[in-house]
Amino acid sequence: MASFNGLGMHLGNLPILSKAESRSISPENPTGEKGKGAMASPDPVKSPARKLGRGWKVSPYIVIEPGEVKVLADIAGAGAIAQIWMTPTGLWRSSILRIYWDDSPTPSVECPVGDFFACGWNRYAQVSSLAVCVNPGSAFNCYWEMPFRKRCRITMTNTAETAMILYYQINYSLTEVTNDAAYFHAQFRRVNPLPYKDVYTILDGVTGRGQFVGLRVPAVFEDRPIPAASKRRRRKTRACRVSGDPRVTPHRAAACFARRVGNAASAVRAMAAKAGAAHSALITQSASPVAEMTTMSDV
């Protein structure tokens, strides 16, 4: 029997020991090196914690200038991302999160940071799920387990005209990864405006083995009366889980996170019939570090 590698932790296997080594990356320990947390020195003039000295959490954020690409993590070896926490300022649609697996030049994750954490329109909306949680104060949390075999590199690109501030922490484990563990992929697509009654393609061009595990679709609808024939479609739209204002209607912003492909497809069909704009963040798992997907465009 193969030994437990420490991945896929839950209450049932919590007592089982493994050789996995947990690590954490943050602005104060950008390499995740063991014993190097809280090593930053406070600014002697500007920092409110300037009298505390080293050994305290005095530098929890970074500043990303316009047009700058910041490397958040560069991890060598085999392991898996366990959790990502971020609190970004600025325009979330203009802050592009990219994740690269195993020295691939093509990112497997390429998505605006707000859409990746199920918050479009640059507005906070509480999200409570096993995979993604967004808490008050725009605290983005991701719990997708993301294995890699050689290397993991995570970047944030600021495409806005003003600087952004990013608070973040990336928790991961260094351990053996089984041959049947799939790579994590996420992409962003946008159609603006979406033509009336046009078919909106959610996923296309993906080959090989994998699992479709998530979808998010925010949309803006035209402010005009809905024909009586569309009432059934409207009820389907409302049946989706909507984040934000509980009074959301098809004439206002809507967000749907569907766990099943069938539910997601029916929700998209219902919303796309009247939508003036549509966006989606797609999440898949694949046996290859580079999935054959349409790259992100028109951010």
Image (cartoon, rainbow, N blue to C red):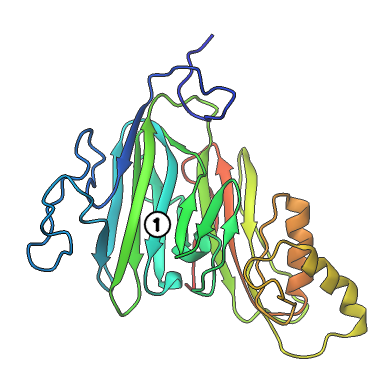
In the image, residue 261 above or below residue 239: above
| Residue drawn where x is 55% and y is 27% of the image | 180
In the image, residue 1 above or below residue 110: above
Where does the N terminus fall, quadrant-wise? top right
**284 or 204, nearer to the observer:** 284
Residue 23 pos. (x, y %):
32, 35
Which of the 4 image quarters holds residue 62?
A: bottom left
**259 or 296, nearer to the observer:** 259
Q: What is the residue that sits farthest to the bottom in this orientation?
A: 224
| Residue drawn where x is 49% and y is 69% of the image | 297
Q: Viewed as shown, does residue 29 lie left or right of 150? A: left
| Residue drawn where x is 34% and y is 64% of the image | 157
Which of the 4 image quarters holds residue 251?
A: bottom right
**169 or 207, nearer to the observer:** 169
Q: What is the residue that sits farthest to the front in this orientation?
A: 51
In the image, residue 128 above or below residue 3: below
Which of the 4 image quarters holds residue 87?
A: bottom left
Q: Viewed as shown, does residue 262 lie left or right of 243? A: right
Residue 272 pos. (x, y %):
73, 73
Q: Which residue has dot 1 on it? A: 86
Residue 282 pos. (x, y %):
59, 56
Q: Viewed as shown, does residue 235 lie left or right of 32? A: right
Q: What is the residue that sits farthest to the right in this orientation?
A: 229
- Secondary structure at badge 1 equals strand
- Count up the numbered dots: 1
Residue 190 pos. (x, y %):
57, 71
Answer yes or no: is residue 106 visible. no
Q: Viewed as shown, does residue 59 lie left or right of 287? A: left
| Residue drawn where x is 78% and y is 77% of the image | 197
**What's under tag 1, amino acid-wise?**
Met
